[in-house]
Image (tube, grey):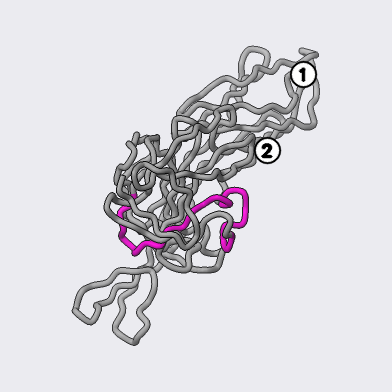
Amino acid sequence: MNYSTNITKLVLLMLALTLVAIAAAQTLYRYKDKDGNWQFTDRPPNDARKVETEQLATRNYEPQVILEQIKIDGGTRLTATNEWHCPMEVFVDFEQVSNLDRELTKDFTVVLDPDSTITLRDYFPIEISEAYSYEMEYRYIAGDPTKTPDNYVYSLPFAKGSEYEVTQAYPSSVTHTDSTSKYAIDFAMPEGTPVYSVREGTVYATAYENYAGGTDRERDLPKANVVRIVHDDGTIAVYAHLLWNAIRVKPGQRVRRGQYIADSGNTGFSSGPHLHFALLANKGMKIESLPIIFDGPGTKPVVPQTGETLYNIE
């Protein structure tokens, strides 16, 4: 589960960025079950009953980090805008520099506050009568690497009085095979199970328009419905495989611990209904998952283990 790392090249002080909403067609199947009730799903029934289909075009727009060049008297000002409701770390790389102070065009990294615009640098030619130029590319990633995760004990991501089995947790690595999922936890949950926030924080990204799910990683991984929440210590909670159109929060919204945020589902790279939960942190232009401890019975800390059933009696 990789966070956005966009790369854009600027040549001869010309910058053109287009924010594109990516359209993806999905098929909705409508049919009646044996009791005459309408069913709406991304998969056809297993038998030959009459089915109605509809092609749905979804548009999942994501905010951007935008570097913009503004002409000023005798030079150029480089600014950065962070459209996300989350800190973003940006790495800027310069090449082919001509007639500019090399100290000002060294590679650098900067952390942008949420919903902010700042001036990065002003550039002026060394020889005023001559042209100046450079090439530049940048990439960005969620989170603030200067923050240190605390020792918070998290609530379970499901309702009080309920219990669910852990089907994958560290050190199991059936599908949790990279640094962003090493310590992720999968809970077996029927579709439509309420999902609750494990800690207070700010929602900074959601995806909710996907129907499809399956076991083809390349095809299905981008199709997961997700809620991402940044916490005050800089960590990021990811709730994935959520049900279509069942997310109850929006980017920029502040949520409390134990707030109902979505319903579990089976979207994206998934072999069956479950909730994928991960706690992430930016470790310097690199996202890594972190071990997590939940509140257990009698507030006793619990480290999730594969095959274990966890009870929320908080």
Magenta region, main secondary structure:
loop
Residue type indicated by callout 1: Glu
Marks 1/2: CA–CA distance:
20 Å
Q: Tell me residue 246's x, y (percent).
A: 31, 54
Disc 2: CA contacts within 10 A as few (<14), some (14-19) or many (>=20): some
Image quarter where the C terminus lies is top left
Point out which mark residue 168 bears: none
Name above or below for residue 87 compared with residue 278.
Answer: above
Outermost residue to the bottom: 48
Q: Tell me residue 234's x, y (percent).
A: 50, 32
Q: Is residue 177 magenta?
A: yes
Residue at the spot x=61%, y=21% of the render?
Answer: 120
- Image quarter for residue 197? top left
Label 2, secondary structure: give it: strand
**Residue at the disc numbered 1:** 103
Sequence-earlier tag: 1 or 2: 2
Check if mark 1's residue and mark 2's residue have beta carbons within 8 Å: no
Left/right of residue 258 with respect to residue 98 in the rendered view: left
Q: Is residue 244 visible?
A: no
Q: Tell me residue 45's x, y (percent).
A: 35, 79
Residue at the spot x=34%, y=87% of the render?
Answer: 48
Q: Tell me residue 188's x, y (percent).
A: 40, 62
Name above or below for residue 133 compared with residue 57.
Answer: above
Q: Nearer the viewer, residue 226 or 180?
A: 180
Q: Is residue 256 magenta?
A: no
Q: Foreground mark, 1 or 2?
A: 1
Q: How many marks?
A: 2
Name above or below for residue 238 compared with residue 173.
Answer: above
Residue range (magenta): 173-195
Left/right of residue 258 with respect to residue 180 in the rendered view: left
Name above or below for residue 226 compared with residue 134.
Answer: below
**Residue at the disc numbered 2:** 9
